[in-house]
Amino acid sequence: MSVTQLIIYLVIAAIVGLLAERLVGAGPWGLIGNIVVGLLGIWVMLNVIKFQLSGDPVIGGVPIITSILGAILVDVVLSLIMRGRGPRRTWSRRRI
């Protein structure tokens, strides 16, 4: 893999991760998190599930719509895992 291919992968992963974050409504993961979610989404859809839509536009060897679907899948799974983490926020009724 050349440096230009790596840069293309990272840019596509960042865009796909950002789109997945906006569509799912989870996060914010930040730029690095979006790149990781995008890369994981590309990898899961192409190597684990081995799913690719026919007629999917390809940029730099990366199918775009399939990558978006993979990033959405990864984002949903991560948000479900991370849901129980962090400080608990309590809700109280305001007295009037």
Image (cartoon, grey):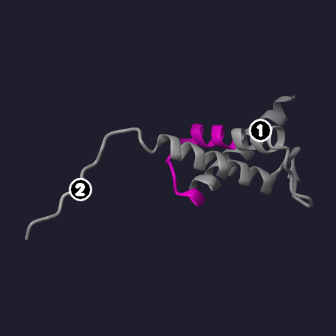
Q: Secondary structure at mark 2?
A: loop
Q: Residue furthest right?
A: 55
Within the image, what quadrant is residue 61 found in?
Answer: top right
Q: Label 1 is placed on what type of residue?
A: Trp
Distance from disc 2 to disc 1, alpha carbons, whole Å, reads 40 Å
Which residue is at 19% across, 58% downward?
92
Quadrant of the snapshot with the N terminus? top right
Q: Nearer the viewer, residue 32 or 67?
A: 67
Q: Provide residue 51's location: percent of width, then percent of height.
A: 84, 49
For disc 2, the neighbor class at 10 Å (few under 14, some 14 to 19, many from 20) is few
User: Considering the image in quadrants, where does the C terminus appear?
Assistant: bottom left
Whether residue 29 is visible, yes or no, is no
Viewer-nearest of labels 2 and 1? 2
76 sits left or right of 40 in the view? left
Count neighbours of disc 1 (C-alpha within 10 A) and say few if under 14, some if 14 to 19, many if 20 or more.
some
Residue 7 occupies quadrant: top right
Left or right of residue 91: residue 28: right
Kindly report the secondary structure that dominates the magenta region of the rendered protein: helix
Q: Residue at x 56, y 42 (%)?
A: 78
Question: Residue 63 magenta-drawn?
Answer: no
Task: Write the residue at 82% across / 30% down.
Answer: 3
Amino acid carrying label 2: it is: Trp
Q: Is residue 55 visible?
A: yes
Which residue bears the numbered disc 1? 43
Q: Which residue is mark 2?
A: 91
Numbered disc 1: secondary structure = helix
Residue placed most toward the observer, 41 or 59: 41
Residue 31 is inside the magenta segment:
yes
**In the figure, 47 relative to 69: above or below?**
above
Span of residues in magenta:
22-38
